[in-house]
């Protein structure tokens, strides 16, 4: 109730009344009051409570946490309330004395005899580490001491939170260092205190110890979370935070444990190795990896322990992900070891589902490393057929539903197809009827239980995804596209049947595949439209699953480009739906910029026939343009969205102008020209558009001048854009901006001289 | 009190091929849109340059 009323200032006495309860003697009243204050802080935004009340709440909460408080229930309620109240304590954390006091009480609570209080206190510390990172320096040594003790000997829920504290500090430092590129300038918001770097010599051994505390079968248990898992995750974050410095601290642990008879030691050593592969420079790791690679391949084949094999296959995947690819100087995969690697991975795909899943993942990254290979005989080519066959075999395993195995196999297959070359195109072509048959079979299955239906839908999604990748690959070159087209009718028939399945992911996948097919088919796609249209409309109406809506909007664009004027019969329905989408408050805002771009696609396809939509579309565009023109003081996220919106609006204008070009109805656009020029001028004056928007904006100026010609000459001459903005763009280093500016210059001079 | 989210396990693979498929489709669509507009402008430019000043 407070959550509803306080923001409207309708229950001003509430906090005072609650606080007066704090002095009540019965502990259960105190406890209930603190719990209520906690809920209140969780529900109500911090700016709804004035500082005086915040101070009183914090005083009451911190007093409740104090070791002098006799009741453990009260201390626990107070500690949990503090967790929620921390967001209110901005002012208090800037005051040294108040902050010292809060920190002392929290640290004391981590030593409470009650495990729940200790856990809640560590949760407060985790939250403080992200909310008040910049205030932590005076306390970090003490926090290290207490967390180290907790990680070593406390109950698991407490130890997990203690590790979480350091993971959270890593997150903060990774963010800071990424943002400032390691150089803190006076303008930066938060400096990096390098807590992790300083703690490294003691932090790393503490984390390595946790790796030995694995549970049996943890790899098969989806919801499992334990010390070893948290420790390895934290170690990975530490590696990303400090880079090269971690390597010498971890290597002795790996060397000592990797050959031990106890599986826990071998697994921990492998896990430590896998965890530190992202962060240090590849050059620093290459020589170690070259030695380790052989060892890992043998372990994956021969180690008797499932857990060790799981971690080994995962580590191989990490090696391929971070140390293999065209950007890495010294290749770790060569013609001489490639065959062995593939043989081991394919063999491993027959192992237990958790191990096979990791092997598929490793293959994914192996293929990804060759995605821009220009060599005439890429290393995977000789094994292509075997790889595809092995992956298909995995998808047919009876236990492929476990450990995400089937999904992983299809993902790898997609990546292998994406990275294939002309040489293997015939084999990709052979895959088309195979995957289509699989999809057909899922559509034939009848009388399924709801559980089976869900699995079927998942499989259909994977198969549509795979077909999308194949369509895109084969339609990228004319000869393969020509051969592939023999399957188009049959494939479209399957996609249409897939829509009968009510599942958002499947619809999205089928829609993406159809978009790719429309692009490949071109004007011939018209024959599918009468049947497909209803699903297109359904997608555009799908507000709840906005991803489906967004994908469908993109597919409308594909269809417009494929059909051109043949899309006209469907445009009334499409435009009606797009306009509805734009007016809706329910639809996720990310879909709105692509809808504007889609107006441009439609206009470009149907030309002057867009006339009847102008009275609806133009006011929408103008309204959005006004909103997006001035956003001073916005944060990065809003600025990014604003630029996406601006780009969408400008793409719409470009499409509309280009569509009307050379039409007798050009003059219908004249009334909108002043506003559009004003929009361009205000974008220029604001100086906060990104390069993409600059390129589109200067292009619109050119399109306007080209389409309206001499009639718009005087208007154009008055605009700042036609002079200063144009000159700036002409001098740009960005080739695309420059090209658009050249175009604008040409059409403007023609319009002005006309 | 809100339950504290435990972070994702580093060993749970970060592949999201579905997101990749979406991103690639989006890139293709943006490229195709740019190409069509470029084509339209190219056509206009060649007509403009044919016309006498």
Image (cartoon, coloured by chain):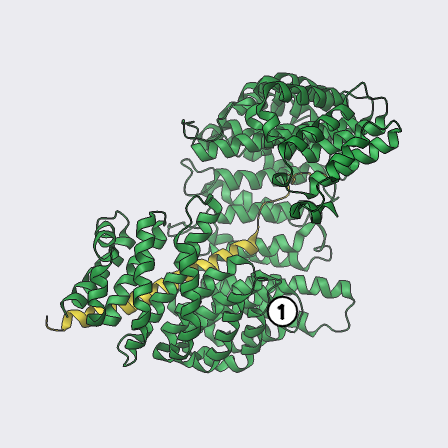
Residue ranking furthest to the right = A26
Q: Tell me which corner region of the image, top left, top right, bottom left or bottom right, holds residue A95.
A: top right
Residue at 43% x, 63% y: name it. Answer: A623
Instruction: Find chain A in the image and tell me its colour.
Output: green
Q: Nearer the viewer, residue A745 or A174?
A: A745
Residue at 23% x, 61% y: name it. Answer: A744
Mark 1 residue element:
helix
Instruction: Find chain B in the image and tell me its colour.
Output: yellow
Q: Is residue A80 left or right of residue A724?
A: right
Horizontal and vertical percent for residue A218? 74, 39
Q: Tell me which corner region of the image, top left, top right, bottom left or bottom right, holds residue A506.
A: bottom right
Q: Nearer the viewer, residue A583 or A648?
A: A583
Image quarter where the C terminus of chain A lies is bottom left
| Circle 1 crowding by C-alpha within 10 Å: few under 14, some 14–19, many from 20 | many
Compared to residue A327, the image places residue A426 above or below, namely: below
Compared to residue A715, the image places residue A569 above or below, namely: below
Q: Is residue A240 left or right of residue A150?
A: left
Specify whether residue B2 is in view: no
Q: Which residue is mark 1?
A: A439
Horizontal and vertical percent for residue A334? 45, 41
Residue at 55% x, 43% y: name it. Answer: A341
Chain bearing mark 1: A
Q: Nearer the viewer, residue A282 or A15?
A: A15
Horizontal and vertical percent for residue A447? 77, 73
Q: Nearer the viewer, residue A380 or A408?
A: A408
């Amino acid at each position: 109730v407070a959550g509803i009323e306080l923001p409207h200032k309708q229950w001003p006495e509430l906090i005072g009344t609650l606080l007066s309860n704090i002095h009540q003697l019965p502990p259960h009243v105190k406890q209930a009051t603190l719990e209520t204050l906690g809920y209140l802080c969780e529900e109500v935004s911090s700016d709804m409570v004035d500082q005086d009340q915040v101070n009183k709440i914090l005083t009451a909460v911190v007093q409740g946490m104090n070791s002098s408080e006799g009741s453990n229930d009260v201390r626990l309620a107070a500690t949990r309330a503090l967790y929620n109240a921390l967001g209110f304590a901005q002012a208090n954390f800037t005051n040294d004395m108040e902050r010292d006091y809060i920190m002392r009480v929290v640290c004391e609570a981590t030593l409470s005899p009650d495990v729940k209080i200790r856990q809640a206190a560590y949760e407060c510390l985790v939250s403080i580490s992200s909310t008040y990172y910049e205030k932590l320096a005076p306390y970090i040594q003490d926090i290290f001491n207490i967390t180290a003790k907790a990680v070593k000997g406390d109950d698991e829920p407490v130890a997990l939170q203690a590790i979480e504290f350091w993971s959270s500090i890593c997150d903060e430092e990774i963010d800071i260092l990424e943002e400032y590129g390691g150089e803190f300038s006076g303008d930066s918001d938060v400096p990096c205190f390098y807590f992790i770097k300083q703690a490294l010599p003691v932090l790393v051994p503490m984390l390595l110890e946790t790796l030995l505390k694995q549970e049996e079968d943890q790899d098969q248990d989806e919801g499992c979370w334990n010390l070893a898992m948290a420790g390895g995750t934290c170690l990975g974050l530490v590696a990303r935070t400090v880079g090269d410095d971690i390597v010498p601290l971890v290597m002795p642990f790996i060397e000592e444990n990797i050959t031990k008879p106890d599986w826990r030691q071998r697994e921990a050593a492998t896990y430590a190795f896998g965890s530190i592969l992202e962060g240090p420079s590849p050059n620093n790791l290459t020589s170690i990896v070259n030695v380790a690679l052989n060892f890992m391949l043998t372990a994956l084949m021969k180690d008797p322990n499932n857990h060790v094999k799981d971690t080994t296959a995962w580590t191989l995947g990490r090696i391929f992900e971070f140390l293999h690819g065209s950007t890495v100087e010294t290749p770790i995969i060569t013609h001489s070891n490639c065959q062995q690697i593939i043989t081991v991975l394919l063999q491993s795909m027959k192992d237990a589902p958790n191990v096979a899943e990791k092997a598929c993942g490793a293959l994914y990254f192996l293929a990804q490393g060759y995605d821009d290979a220009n060599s005439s005989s890429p290393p995977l080519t000789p094994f292509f057929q075997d790889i595809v066959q092995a992956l298909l075999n995995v998808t047919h395993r009876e236990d492929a539903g476990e450990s995400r195995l089937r999904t992983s196999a299809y993902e790898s297959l997609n990546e292998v197809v994406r990275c294939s070359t002309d040489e293997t195109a015939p084999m990709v072509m052979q895959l088309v009827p195979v995957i289509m048959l699989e999809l057909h079979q899922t559509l034939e299955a009848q009388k399924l239980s709801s559980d089976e239906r869900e699995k079927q839908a998942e499989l259909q999604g994977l198969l549509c995804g795979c077909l999308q990748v194949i369509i895109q690959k084969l339609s990228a070159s004319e000869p393969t596209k020509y051969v592939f087209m023999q399957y188009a009718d049959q494939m479209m028939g399957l996609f249409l049947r897939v829509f009968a399945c009510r599942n958002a992911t499947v619809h999205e996948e089928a829609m993406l595949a159809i978009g790719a097919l429309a692009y490949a088919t071109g004007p011939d796609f018209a024959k599918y439209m009468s049947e497909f249209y209803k699903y297109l409309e359904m997608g555009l109406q799908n507000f709840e699953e906005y991803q489906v809506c967004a994908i469908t909007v993109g597919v409308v664009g594909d269809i417009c480009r494929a059909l051109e004027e043949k899309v006209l019969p469907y445009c009334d329905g499409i435009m009606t739906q797009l306009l509805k989408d734009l007016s809706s408050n329910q639809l996720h805002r990310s879909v709105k910029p692509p809808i504007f771009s889609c107006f441009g696609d439609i206009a470009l396809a149907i030309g002057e026939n867009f006339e009847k939509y102008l009275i609806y579309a133009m006011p929408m565009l103008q309204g959005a343009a006004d909103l997006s023109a001035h956003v001073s003081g916005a944060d990065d996220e809003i600025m990014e969205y604003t630029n996406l919106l601006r780009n969408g609006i400008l793409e719409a204008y470009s499409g509309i102008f280009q569509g009307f070009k050379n039409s007798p109805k050009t003059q219908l656009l004249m009334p909108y020209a002043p506003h559009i020029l004003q929009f361009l001028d205000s974008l220029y004056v604001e100086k906060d558009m990104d390069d993409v928007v600059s390129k589109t904006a200067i292009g619109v100026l050119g399109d306007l001048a080209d389409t309206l010609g001499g009639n718009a000459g005087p208007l154009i001459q008055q605009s700042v854009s036609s002079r200063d903005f144009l000159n700036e763009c002409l001098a740009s280093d960005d080739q695309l901006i420059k090209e658009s500016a050249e175009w604008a210059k040409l059409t403007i001079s023609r319009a002005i001289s006309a | 009190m809100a339950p504290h989210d435990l972070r994702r396990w580093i060993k749970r693979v970060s592949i999201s091929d579905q997101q990749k498929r979406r991103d690639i489709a989006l890139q293709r669509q943006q490229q195709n849109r740019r190409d069509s507009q470029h084509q339209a402008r190219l056509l206009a430019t060649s007509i403009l340059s044919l016309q006498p000043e």
